[in-house]
Image (cartoon, rainbow, N blue to C red):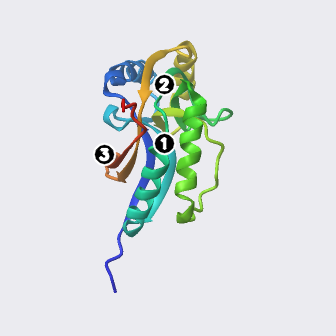
């Protein structure tokens, strides 16, 4: 029998390094609440288009081919990051995020195309409505949540900045005791405007 290995994977838009320091400033302000939050490391920031979960490594060539074909026709677009919020909207927070604005139709289109390309994997997770955001922290317990929510309310209009989106990436998520490590496995660039 052949070697069967799985990889925990997701498809996302990488977050530009030039905006990481602005997210770190926001995280530092929120850390003053001393809430029980695992903050996303700046190098791990991304906008998830689809979480794939554990997938067999053997499907990667087919998935990559489908993504490359579909995404190469996309025009680059611009998104901006503004505002801080939480999921779920009601009740105790589990995820702290920065909102996405700008060309949300481009972002939605990319997410839909990714889901079409990965449909052959028969991912059993319940499909949620795509809600574009940048996760910056995951809440672990109720400690000091009211203080955290108060700081979030004061910083609700926080502007992080705008970035061009010209590619998506397939990431591997490696779980460690110190938090996950995200490694880019492949990049899928959008169409480039080349003169003929």
Residue highlighted by disc 1: 73
Is residue 115 in view?
yes
Mark 2, residue position: 78
Residues at marks 1 and 2 touching, judged by CB atoms closer than 8 Å: no
Numbered badge on residue 178: 3
Are there few (<14), some (14-19), or many (20+) residues within 10 Å of tag 1? Answer: few
Residue furthest to the front in view is 196
Please say if the residues under marks 2 and 3 sit with CB atoms less than 8 Å apart.
no
Indicate the position of residue 138 as horizontal and vertical percent values: 48, 38
Residue 39 visible in the picture: no
* Residue at screen point 66% across, 32% down: 89
The residue positioned 64% from the left and 55% from the top of the image is: 126
Q: Position of residue 158 (x, y in %)?
A: 50, 15
Frontmost of labels 2 and 3 is 2
Q: Position of residue 36 (x, y in %)?
A: 45, 34
Q: Earlier in the sequence, mark 1 or mark 2?
A: 1
């Amino acid at each position: 029998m052949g070697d069967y290995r799985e990889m925990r994977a997701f498809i996302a838009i990488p977050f530009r390094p030039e905006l990481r320091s602005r997210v770190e400033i926001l995280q530092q302000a929120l850390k003053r609440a001393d809430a029980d939050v695992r903050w996303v490391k700046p190098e791990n920031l991304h906008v998830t288009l689809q979480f794939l979960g554990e997938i067999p490594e053997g499907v990667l060539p087919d998935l990559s081919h489908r993504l490359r074909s579909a995404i190469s026709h996309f025009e680059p677009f611009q998104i901006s990051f503004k505002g801080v919020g939480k999921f779920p909207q009601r009740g105790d927070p589990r995820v702290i995020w920065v909102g996405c604005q700008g060309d949300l139709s481009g972002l939605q289109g990319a997410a839909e195309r990714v889901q079409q390309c990965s449909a052959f994997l028969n991912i059993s997770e319940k499909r949620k409505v795509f809600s574009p955001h940048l996760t910056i922290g995951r809440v672990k317990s109720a400690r000091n949540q009211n203080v955290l929510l108060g700081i979030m309310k004061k910083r609700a209009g926080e502007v992080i900045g705008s970035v061009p989106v010209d590619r998506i990436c397939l990431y591997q998520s490696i779980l460690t005791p110190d938090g996950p490590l995200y490694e880019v496995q492949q990049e899928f660039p959008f169409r480039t405007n080349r003169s003929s």
